[in-house]
Image (cartoon, grey):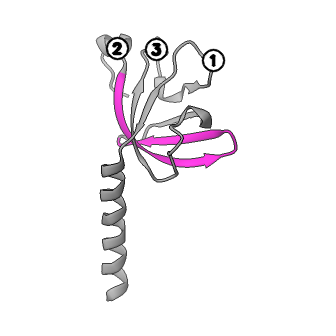
Amino acid sequence: MANSTSSVNQPARKRGVIDQLEGDLATIVFDDNEQLVIARNLLPANARSGDVVMVNVPATPAADAAAQSFSVGASAVPAIEVQADDTAASQKRVHDLLDDIFKQ
């Protein structure tokens, strides 16, 4: 992981997709293939698996913030916003690709 020392103390704004919702946990996979596991109740109420999200990951002194888990009541939790337009565009791309594959 290529993090500079100055970025350790600043929150990171990262784009990802809700990959799994399992029990009380949610897994978000970011564009760089890193994953974040959080308590499911930290997601917006309208969040679903497959939604594109923007995550403001709080600054952490941990060497690998991507491996950190967050839960309600923790001192710093990520702020998560569903990106409805990006989700719709992503779903359309997948649908169009499937159409192209099965038309042949």
Residue at image point 61% right, 34% down: 41
Q: Is residue 26 left or right of residue 94?
A: right
Q: Earlier in the sequence, mark 3 or mark 2?
A: 2
Give me the disc on residue 60: 3
Q: Position of residue 27 (x, y in %)?
A: 55, 41
User: Pointer 3: residues within 10 angstroms few (<14), some, or many (20+)?
Assistant: some
Q: Quadrant of the C terminus?
A: bottom left
Given this view, does label 1 or label 2 mark the residue nearer the observer? Answer: 1
Mark 1 and mark 2: Cα distance apart in space: 21 Å
| Magenta segment | 12-31
Q: Earlier in the sequence, mark 1 or mark 2?
A: 2
Residue at image point 50% right, 45% down: 47
Q: Position of residue 61 (x, y in %)?
A: 46, 11
Residue type at the position of mark 1: Gly
The secondary structure type at the circle numbered 1 is loop
Q: Is residue 22 left or right of residue 15?
A: right
The secondary structure type at the circle numbered 2 is loop
Q: Position of residue 54 (x, y in %)?
A: 37, 36
Q: Is residue 36 left or right of residue 15?
A: right
Q: Earlier in the sequence, mark 1 or mark 3?
A: 3
The secondary structure type at the circle numbered 3 is loop
Q: Is residue 26 magenta?
A: yes
Mark 3 and mark 2: Cα distance apart in space: 8 Å
Residue at mark 2 = 10
Residue at mark 1 = 73
